[in-house]
Amino acid sequence: MNDTPYRKTVNIIAIVASAAFAGGGLLILLSYGIRWLGTDPLVWRAAFWDEFVNFALTIIPLNMITLVGLVLSARLDWQDRPIRRTWMIAIWLYVANTVFTLGYFIPQNILLIWDSYTAAQASSIRATWLGLHVLRVVIATAVPVYAILAVIRRAEAKSATRQQIEQRAP
């Protein structure tokens, strides 16, 4: 069976969805984040839910689609250790970002939604949230980079195999 169309499809899903997810995180940082820094902490805290819903509705599905693309792509290259390793780095970066999100950002976002901070606390929370979000964007950006590296390594391996076969041919 020729797995090329399927392979291309799941590889494209892994790359495009993870890049879109990273781009969404960068957008949050550079648009919302910059605006938040110039907003009164209590106004920011009070408006957080509406803005959270706006970006969560797009970025969460991208995160789920990324997982599907990464897992299916890694599965296709499971027998090739160097390529599998590259896919696994992408998956572990994805997992690290997800754990980071679930462990800090989701609980913090819920507390912000409950509107339970003073102005000083909200200002400190905002600075921490944005600072840690920078790290999250860096991690998220590495995922499509490793996915692209895996696809390139697969193409190089296929090309090398084809050359070996051609050299052996009479």
Image (cartoon, grey):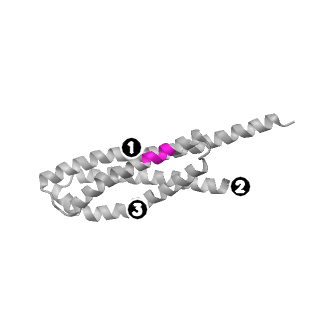
- Residue, disc 1: 138
| Residue 90 is inside the magenta segment | yes
Position in image of residue 57 (x %, y %): 38, 64
- Residue, disc 2: 2
SS at mark 3 in the image? helix
Q: Looking at numbered disc 2 in the image, what kind of residue is underneath it? A: Asn
Q: Residue furthest right?
A: 170
The answer to whether residue 145 is visible is no
Say left or right for 124 vs 101.
left
Position in image of residue 67 (x %, y %): 48, 55
Residue depicted at x 60% and y 42%: 152
Tell me the mark number nearer the camera, choosing from 3 and 2. Answer: 2
Q: Looking at numbered disc 3 in the image, what kind of residue is underneath it? A: Thr
Q: Which residues are magenta?
A: 88-93
Residue depicted at x 21% and y 58%: 44
SS at mark 2 in the image? loop
Q: Which residue is more in the foreground, 12 or 101?
A: 101
Position in image of residue 161 (x %, y %): 71, 39
Q: Spatial distance from mark 1 to mark 3, Cα to Cα?
A: 19 Å
